[in-house]
Image (cartoon, rainbow, N blue to C red):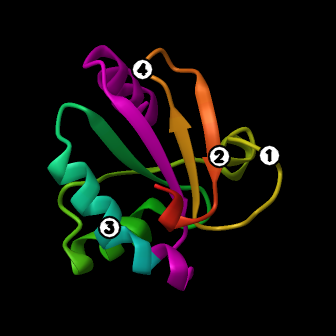
Amino acid sequence: DKSNGILKEAMDNNEFIILDLWFVHCSACLRAMPKMNDLNEKNTGKIKVIAVNGIDSSTLANDIFSSFGFSHLENISISRHELSKLGDDSWGFPRYIYVAKNGDILDLKFNINSL
């Protein structure tokens, strides 16, 4: 599956991973996307930002990415069940999960300014 392939590739490339959990109707999520796009572009080979959407259809999420030009971010869609496994059960968005190069979850943040 695409999400496992992207995560495995980032770990194989020895990249620090930030999972950016978002959904289409989250205005804070969309306001933060340009910063995440820039972070990914400026840190190629060191940091991999992966936008993870567990609420909207992959078609709708991809349409948003295309319309805003977020060309430096990987966008994956997962099920709500898979989404609930990432961190705690709260549904605050955007949510940022920091993943070590070995795959361990290091931290969970809800604030773009904490990056």
Classify mark 4: helix, strand or loop: loop
User: 2 or 114: nearer the eye?
Assistant: 114
Q: CA distance from mark 4 to mark 1?
A: 21 Å
Q: CA distance from mark 2 to mark 4?
A: 16 Å
Taking 14 as reference, is 78 left or right?
A: right
Q: CA distance from mark 2 to mark 3?
A: 18 Å
Taking 105 as reference, is 89 left or right?
A: right
* Residue type, numbered disc 1: Asp
State yes or no: residue 14 in magenta: yes
Instruction: Tell me the number on the disc at residue 114.
Output: none
Choose mark 4 or mark 1, whichever is in front.
4
* Residue type, numbered disc 4: Lys
Question: In this picture, is 29 found above or below 41?
Answer: below
Q: CA distance from mark 1 to mark 3?
A: 24 Å
Instruction: Tell me the number on the disc at residue 88.
Output: 1
Would you call the spot at circle 3 few (<14 residues within 10 Å), some (14-19), or many (20 or more)? few
Among numbered discs 1 and 3, the one appearing first in the sequence? 3
* Residue type, numbered disc 2: Leu
Choose mark 2 or mark 1, whichever is in front.
2
Residues in magenta, as a range: 1-29
Quarter of the image with the N terminus is top left
* Residue type, numbered disc 3: Lys
User: 85 or 96: nearer the eye?
Assistant: 96
Classify mark 1: helix, strand or loop: loop
Looking at the image, which residue is at 17% across and 52% down?
A: 41
Check disc 2 and report the residue beneath it: 108
Looking at the image, which residue is at 55% across and 82% down?
A: 25
Among numbered discs 4 and 1, the one appearing first in the sequence? 1
User: 49 or 4: nearer the eye?
Assistant: 49
